Image (spheres, rainbow, N blue to C red):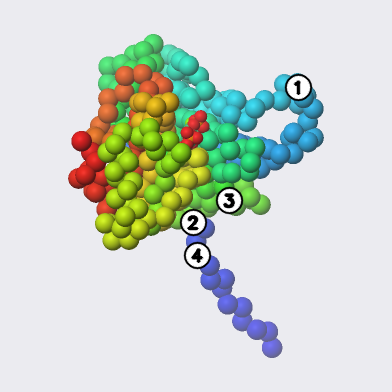
Amino acid sequence: MSEQTEPLKTAPIITVQQHILQEQKRFPGASGEFSWLLSGITMATKMIQAKVRRAGLSDILGEQGAVNVQGEVQQKLDVYSNEVLVHCLSTRESIGVLASEENEEPILVHQGSENANYAVVFDPLDGSSNIDVNVSVGTTFSILRRPPGVSLDEPEKWVLQPGSKTIAAGYVVYGSSTLLVYSVGNGVHGFTLEPSVGAYILSHPNMKMPQQGKYYSVNEAYIDTFPPRYREYIERLRSGVLGHKYASRYIGSMVADFHRTLLKGGVFLYPPTEANPGGKLRLLYEANPIAFLAEQAGGTAIDGTQRVLDIQPESIHQRVPFVVGSRVELADFERFASK
Ligand code: AHM
Ligand code: MG
């Protein structure tokens, strides 16, 4: 007698492409262009993670100044990451402007195309000084729409928009797994790369930052040069006035430090310092995408005084002090330190 086989009971597998197609319905008239645009980012980050995963080996296997199969000289990972992103995004007709930490000026693509309506700003490999010691690094990005009336030959105006105008933002953290976290303004969703099939699979739907966490995250070596209100705030966290005494965690790779803050709550700070009086992190492609995600997940992001997403950028590589995290810690900062 043959046995009746039970149907396989597994949760449905949702790839990032499926998810984006679903989310795209929020943009009337987008008709596939937005998912095609985002697939440029997912493709590029898969290529970047492949290189990051064998970073140590390339040094062992490659020679100094070695030439690869394409006849190109082997490049540092941040330069490679930038080139991959520029290449993958340049093939998306809906993009008119790219701005990267690695390029002084914005890059014009598809100039003249009536379909070019979006700008993408990104840091191709944030925290890349951590590569040599096998510590997590990441890619951050924001997507902005061309402002009405701005022409194709004014690329700066495409990207010098406050973060509140962000259409979509995200990051990829190249950690113990490769994880893509993104939002189109409808919650925050995380996708883990399944390496054997090369697909990002939904693993963290509708991520919410805890209201309060246990950790603060800051480069404490610079504490003597922080403005006094930041020093006093850190002392508040350490003293237990917020209900418990905080522990500290600092990776030195913003994407990884924020990713922990998103999952576990707490606060990440990069205050003004003696070396960087205006803060170190870049507004357009580091602070803004993280601030957008933080708010979407129920957290808060300020520059020490005002909401990061309200800042009108004046230049592409402008820096900003950055305080981001859970509601409780940020409310305390705003009450006692945000003068
Ligand atoms: P980068 O864009 O040159 O990699 O610099 C940004 C990185 C962030 O990932 C991190 O939060 C910060 O620099 C760490 O700086 P520091 O070493 O001063 O603490
Ligand atoms: Mg960076």
Crowd around label 3: few <14 · some 14–19 · many ≥20 (10 Å): some
Which of marks 3 and 4 precedes in the sequence? 4
Say which residue appears at 58% left-offset and 38% top-offset. 130
Report the disc number at residue 177. 3
> Which residue is under mark 4?
11
Disc 4 element: loop
337, 198: nearer the viewer = 337
Kindly identify the residue that appears in the image at 38 percent across and 36 percent down.
Answer: 224
Q: Position of residue 150 (x, y in %)?
A: 31, 16
Q: Secondary structure at mark 2?
A: strand
Quadrant in which the C terminus is drawn: top left
The tag on residue 139 is none
Q: Secondary structure at mark 3?
A: loop
First reached walking from the N terminus: tag 1 or tag 2:
1
How far apart are the two marked residues, 1 and 2, measured between alpha carbons? 40 Å
Q: How far is the residue under mark 4 from the one under mark 3?
A: 21 Å
Task: State yes or no: Cβ of the residue under disc 3 lies below 8 Å from any atom of ligand 1.
Answer: no
* Residue 65 image label: 1
Q: Which mark is residue 203?
A: 2
